[in-house]
Each structure stands twice: as C-alpha cells, then as structure tokens.
Amino acid sequence: MSRITRETAHGIRWMLLQKCTLQPVTLVYSMVLARLLSKEEMGLMALTAIFFTAAGSLAAGGFGSALIRRQNYTGEDADTLFWFNLGMGLLIALLIWLSAPWLAAFFAAPQLCALVQVSAGIILLNSLASVPMAHYMARRQFKAPALINLGAALVTMPLCLLLAWQGYGVWAYMMQGLVSSLLSAGLFICLCPWKPRLRFSQSSFRALAPLSCRLAATSLLDTAYIHARAFFIGKVYTPAALAGYKNGAQLAAMCPTVLCYMIEQVTFPILSTLQHSPQKLIGVYRRYMRLFTLPIAWLCCFSAAFAAPLVELCYGPGWEECVPYLQILSLSYATWHLQLINLNLLKAGGPEKLFLRLELLKKCLGIGILIGMFFISVQAICWGALGTSALCLAINTWATRRYMRIPTRLQLRDWAPTCALAAACAWLPAQLCPATTPLCSLAIGLIVSLGIYLVILRLAAPAALRDALLLARQLAAHHQHIASPRQGTAR
C-alpha cells in the first residue's frame, strides 16, 4: 500500500504543478479575452472549441489507454498502435476537412469553414503524441507529460492574447491550439525514449485493437456529449447566449477539472497494476473516493454559493446571465470525480466491454434529457445537465456494486456525508456575508466557509482527512527528495 501511496503522490505532484500553474494563467487569459472580444466573437470561439476539442479526443482515442492497461507491452505493440493511430488521424482529418463547409452552413457562420479545416491539422499533430505520452503514463512517469503540456500552453497563451489585441478575433484562439499541438507533438517525439519503428504486427493489432476501439468510442462519446449542449445552444440560440453559457460553464469547471484530470490520468495506471489483486484494488478505490471528495465537493459548493461575485470579478459587468448557469453546473460537477473513479475501476478490473455499454446507456439518456430541455431555455439545459449527472452516478454506482461487489451503502458512506457537509459550509456563509465588492465578498466567504469546513472535519476525523494528510506528507517528502538528491545519497 505504501508503493501505491507513493506513486499516487508522485503523479498528483506533477499533475498539480501543471494544472495549478495553468489555471490562474487560463483564468487571466479568459478575463482578458472577455474584454477584448464581443459576445458574438466569444460565441464563435465556443463553437470553434467544439471541433477543436473533438479533434483532440479523436486523435488520442483509446490507443494509449490500451497500452497502459496491457502493462507489459512490447515495442512491437507500441509501433503497431502508433501507425494505426496515425492512419486513423489522417482519415479523420480528411473527413473533418470535407465536412467544414456543411458545418459552416448548418450554423449560418461562414467563418467556421476555415476554422474547422485548420482544426483538422490538430488531429494529425495529436496523433503523433498519443503513444509517446502513453509510454510515460504506463510507467507512472508523470513529470515529462506535465512539463511538456505546461510549457506548450505557457508559450502559446501570450500569442493568442497578442493576436486578439491586434484584431484577429477568433483566429487568435485557433492559432493558439495549432501552435500548442505542434510544440507538444514535437517535444513528445523528441524526448520520449521510445521511438517508433517502421513495422506493423497483425498479432499485436488483433490483441490491442478491440480494447483500443472500445476506449476510443468511449472517449468520443464522452467528448461529443460534453459539447452537445454548446452545439445545440449555438444552433438554436444566439452566439451571445452561447458565450454566456460557455463562460458560466468555464468557471464551474475551472477547479473540479484540475483534480478530475489528475484523477483520470493518475488513478487508471495505478489501478491497472492491481487488476489481479481484487481486494487491494477495491481498497485503493475506496480511499480515492474519500480523498478526492474532500476538496472537490467544497470547491463546487463554494462556486455555486458565491456565483454572483465570482462572475462579476472575472468577467466584469454585463455577464449577469452567467450566474444561474454557474450555480447549476457547479453542483453537477460535484460528483463528476466519483464517475471518473468508478469508470477507471471498471476499466482496470471489470469486463472489457462493460464500460462502453455503460457509456452508451448514459449518453443516450443524457441526449434524451438534453433534447427535452434545449427548446425551453438555456437555464433548463443546465438543469438537465444536473439531472443527468445524478442519473449517471446512480448507474455507475450500480455497475460497481454488480461487477466489483462493492455494496451501495459502502459507496454512499465514502462520499455522501462529505458532500452534505460541504454544501452546508458553503451556503450558510453565503447567506450571512454582507454584500460588498466582489473581491471582499469572495475573500470573507472563503475564509469563513473553508474555516468552518476544516474545523468540522478535524473534529469528526473522517477517513478521508487522514488519507489527505498522509498524501500531503508523501508529497512533501517526495518534494524534499527531489530538491536535495545529493544530501539523501550522502546519508
């Protein structure tokens, strides 16, 4: 168990470095763009982001995850998936290029045609980086991917702001994505110790392709579902309405996605190493549920409770329509990490076909709810997202009980009390804090809410708090070891 804690701490350390450095920069970047671009331009940027993100998801697919699950894969396996992935990237890029005029006509936005065609190039670049990144992740070497992605983002964000300031509008955003993908792909290819060789093994392909395709389909479904709301809002409502929704959704996702990205990247490789030890696998899974609920539940509840001053501080006056979107979507993110951990557990230790079937079921239900809501209002779409999140959590909980033999009451015991406590500690100070400037309201609310939350946790002493303290000590010890390697050697 100490090895698992050490590897988790190592992965979290580098993922936190990447995301905690990027999030403040990304927030400032979004605040500046909101003041440089009009609401219509922000809406067009949100439409472009749909195809931008879908391109990255299609390129990455499930091929890297298949290597991670295989554990003892050979160089021939990696070469086979690399060339297959690159071929699929070429095919998908061609299809997106040809469909660009139709998409521009569908949204009645002629500018979209060229933007979507440029996003096709991102697919090819991301295809090159998929297998080298999986090579690092399979060996729990989280440092290199974190530094590469961090460096590419920090270099390209100033470029985007400069182009936006010069009047290039949404093209500034697209150029940032293109240059960032180019830098990331080049660094992964150059720095990864594994290098692709010109060979393709049919036996390796037959062994890896079924799982890879199921993972790729799951990833595509997830990406399409996440952006389906923006897709329908962009078609049915105005670009300005889409911009308001996207800004609210961005603030709601800002904090939980840092930890959820870390959960997805770190927990799956570690859980995969325990796939042949069911009891250890379940024990680590339950610790992850308690540990990550601790910060995510409070962050989401705090964002919902203090939505009004948060929107005014970040985007300025004129964006009040974002407030209800931020409140509702923040609550929907409060249990997202539970779904990811459940999915990673089933991917690591459950039947190979199970998670794809679950994703198909959940996405079909979610799309049905979305179709029923999107003609009502944008706020109704957000309420549908909250209902879908609760429904998906119920399905994942059932699947974990059915296939991993973890009773529902144990799963609820691991996270439900912490969520209830976080909600109370966020909403009560929000009702009592005086209405002052946005910055003062957030500062007072943060101190009062977090203080009450930590005091109650300390008195109650749940298992999640002990796990958090243990992980923090592991992070500190690892940082100390990295900072003074010679000293450790001398001792």
Image: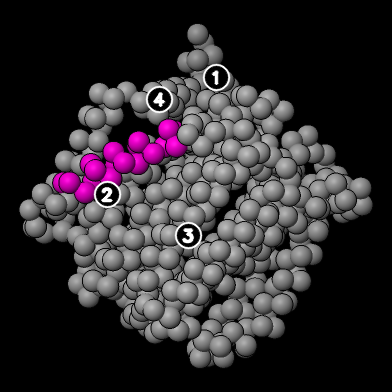
Amino acid beneath label 1: Ser
Q: Determine which of the numbered discs, if any, sits on residue 253 in the image.
A: none
User: Which of label 1 and label 3 is nearer to you?
Assistant: 3
Q: Secondary structure at mark 3?
A: helix
Amino acid beneath label 3: Thr
Residue visible at 32% across and 23% down? 461
Residue under circle 2?
302
Amino acid beneath label 2: Phe
Give the spatial CA distance, label 2 vs label 4: 22 Å
The magenta-colored residue range is: 412-429
User: Which of label 2 and label 3 is nearer to you?
Assistant: 3
Give the spatial CA distance, label 1 vs label 3: 37 Å
Mark 2 Cα shell of 10 Å, populated few (<14), some (14-19), many (≥20): many
Q: Determine which of the numbered discs, if any, sits on residue 388 in the image.
A: 3
Residue under circle 1?
2
Mark 1 Cα shell of 10 Å, populated few (<14), some (14-19), many (≥20): few
Q: Secondary structure at mark 4?
A: helix
- Image location (x, y in percent) of residue 117: 62, 79
Residue visible at 44% across and 37% down? 412
Asked if the stretch drawn in magenta spans residue 324, the answer is no
Residue toward you, 93 or 29: 93
